[in-house]
């Protein structure tokens, strides 16, 4: 899952070396939280107009997680 998020994020930004994905341990509801960190200048590219790109990233990640029987949440920092 981490590799998927890295690949998607690096394809969207101008500075792919600044992209970093961190993973939190599952919480009490067994939800794994993934944090995408990008350069400040690329924040708009990752979020998109009205959050459409961010929503699409979350949808793709959740779909991949369902195939692995996982519960995830993606946050963009």
Image (cartoon, rainbow, N blue to C red):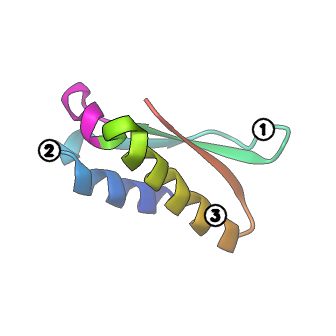
Real-space CA distance between mark 2 and mark 3, rounded to the nearest whole angstrom: 27 Å
- Overall secondary structure of the magenta section: helix
> For the view shown, which residue lies furthest in the front direction?
50
Q: Are marks 2 and 1 in contact (CB under 8 Å)?
A: no
* Rendered location of residue 20, percent (x, y): 36, 42
Q: Which residue is mark 1?
A: 27
Q: Is residue 29 left or right of residue 36?
A: right
Which residue shows up at 69% across the image and 41% down it?
25
Which residue shows up at 45% across the image and 53% down it?
57
> For the view shown, which residue lies furthest in the right direction?
28
Front-lying residue, 61 or 44:
44
Q: Is residue 32 above or below residue 4?
A: above
Q: Which residues are magenta?
A: 37-45
Front-lying residue, 59 or 68:
59
* Rendered location of residue 75, percent (x, y): 52, 37
- Choose the circle earlier in sequence order: 2 or 3: 2
* Rendered location of residue 38, percent (x, y): 31, 35
Is 18 included in the stretch rendered in magenta? no
- Choose the circle earlier in sequence order: 2 or 1: 2
Q: Which residue is mark 2?
A: 14
Real-space CA distance between mark 1 and mark 3, rounded to the nearest whole angstrom: 16 Å
For numbered disc 1, what is the local secondary structure? loop
Q: Which residue is mark 3?
A: 65
């Amino acid at each position: 899952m981490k590799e998927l998020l890295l690949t998607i994020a690096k394809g969207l930004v101008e500075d792919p070396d600044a992209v970093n994905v961190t993973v939190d341990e599952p919480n009490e509801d067994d939800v794994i939280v993934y944090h995408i960190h990008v350069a400040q200048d690329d924040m708009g590219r990752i979020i998109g107009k009205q959050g459409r790109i961010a929503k699409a990233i979350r949808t793709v990640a959740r779909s991949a997680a369902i195939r692995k029987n996982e519960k995830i949440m993606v946050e963009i920092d």
